Amino acid sequence: MKLMEYQGKDLFRRVGIPTPSGVFATTPGEVKSFIEGHPGSWVLKSQVLMGGRGKAGGIKFADDAAQGETLARELIGKVLKSVQNPEGEEVRSLLVEEKVAIASEAYVSIAIDRGAKKPVVLVTAQGGMDVEEVAEHDPDAIKKYWIDPAAGYSPFVGRLLAFHAKLPEGYRKAFPAILGALYTLFMDYGANLVEINPLVLTKDGRVIASDAKVDLDDNGLYKHPDIAAWNKAQPTDEDQAAAVAIGLGMSNYAKFADEPGAVPKTIGTIANGAGLGMGTMDAVKSAGGGAANFLDIGGGAQAELVKNSYKLVTADPRVKAMFINIFGGITRGDQVALGIVEALKGNDVRKVPLVIRLTGTNADEGRKILAEAGFFPVETMDEGAAKAVALASGSK
Ligand code: GDP
Ligand code: MN
């Protein structure tokens, strides 16, 4: 899970890495009133996951509230593009930070070296916006150190690296503690990468993390539920929001617009697993129909989720028949069947002809529940698709 700069800096503060003072904002009005209350020079930093924001025009400087508001209006909604990300990423929020007078910009990162099976620290005095070019043209300027996780971090590592990388004198006292804190963050939060670029030496002699790039290993996120929740907060369209609202992931549901000249999209689909979901849409297409949506209920779905997924798909008025295609592994057939029966009991759902293919774990129990409720599942995916298409067009 990649973190935005403001989230990375939240973790920096938890471990004691100094960051500029600042505030997170999502509207020009918030920026204006913040600067009104805190007169001075501020940096407006676009919060996107892509790097190279400075070069892409995503970092601006404001000297008063009116200028802050104008610049915020320019930035929010803007699509930032870079060489690494030609499609671009839309800016939805800003970090407003104390503008510091920079004396020097260094670079420090810790990443996993899979070959060495150890975290590797990279340090260079030539930080700032062009560190990739330093790596290409002056690789010797980047100093590396592999930390043995059994021995852990010692301040001498920081002193050694600061010396070898020729960090200016002003960094030397603070650097070992900052690197130690970065290592603590790296280990305690299960990071793939932590990077400070630039680690700034200010003209008044402070060493602070001006930028933050943090990538956490998803497999360790369960240890930090507060951070895992950051990820789920920002759906970018209606379908994603609808999926998140019922407890699905953002990319587990998508609705497809009708296309001129193509078969009308009248078949609702629900499957477990993205692959089976796509296969289900293909089967509908081969049977001469059009899938109105993709919906992957994921592994281990419970009855409640199945019920809410059914409601979500049938809320689309174009849907004239529903094809539910479940291959039970972790997902249990009885839970799926209970969800369907529950969904159809309520008066708040639109009922459409329903075709169900259910195989795998607890499929027999599931079929029994469905049969008792008056539904008869089909055996194969192609049979199910053909039946759904026939039902949608009115013939049986
Ligand atoms: P990135 O381009 O996405 O890596 O964004 P950064 O946060 O690294 O900012 C890019 C550049 O903007 C930095 O390398 C600095 O040169 C400049 N910058 C950012 N914050 C400040 C600041 O407080 N004062 C000054 N003078 N420059 C800043
Ligand atoms: Mn940077």
Image (spheres, rainbow, N blue to C red):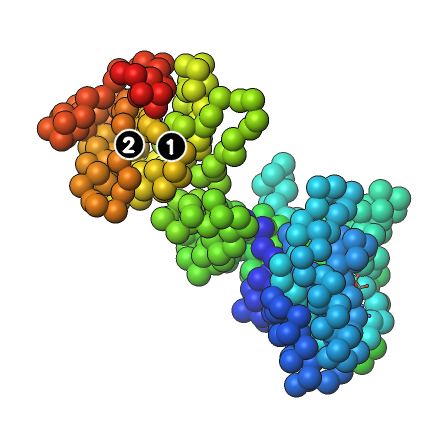
- Mark 1 Cβ inside 8 Å of ligand 1: no
Determine whether the residue tagged by mark 1 lies in a helix, strand or loop.
loop
User: Is residue 177 in view?
Assistant: no
Give x and y (percent) for residue 33: 65, 80
Total marks drawn? 2
* Mark 2 secondary-structure assignment: loop
Most extreme residue toward the left is: 372
Residue shown at 62%/68% (left/top)?
Answer: 27
Labels 2 and 1: the sequence-earlier one: 1
Q: Position of residue 192 (x, y in %)?
A: 58, 48
In the figure, 2 relative to 45: above or below? above
Query: Few, some or many C-alpha atoms within 10 Å of disc 1 (few <14, some 14-19, many ≥20)?
Result: many
| Residue 372 vs residue 392, the one in the foreground | 392
Q: Is residue 54 left or right of residue 340?
A: right
As drawn, is 225 to the left or to the right of 383?
A: right
- Whether residue 215 is situated above or below residue 313 in the rendered picture: below
Q: Are marks 2 and 1 in contact (CB under 8 Å)?
A: yes
Residue sitting at x 23%, y 41%: 343
In the rendered image, residue 90, in percent from the top left (x then y), is placed at: 66, 52
Q: Residue at x 63, y 42 (%)?
A: 113
The CA span between labels 2 and 1 is 8 Å
Which of the pair 191/7 is nearer the observer?
Answer: 7
Q: Write down the quadrant of residue 164 in the picture.
A: bottom right
Q: Amino acid at mark 1?
A: Val
Q: To which residue does mark 2 refer?
A: 352
Pick whichever, 357 or 182, lies toward us. 357
According to the picture, the residue beneath numbered tag 1 turns out to be 319
Q: Quadrant of residue 30?
A: bottom right
Residue type at numbered disc 2:
Val
| Residue 236 in view in this figure | yes
Q: Is residue 308 left or right of residue 224?
A: left
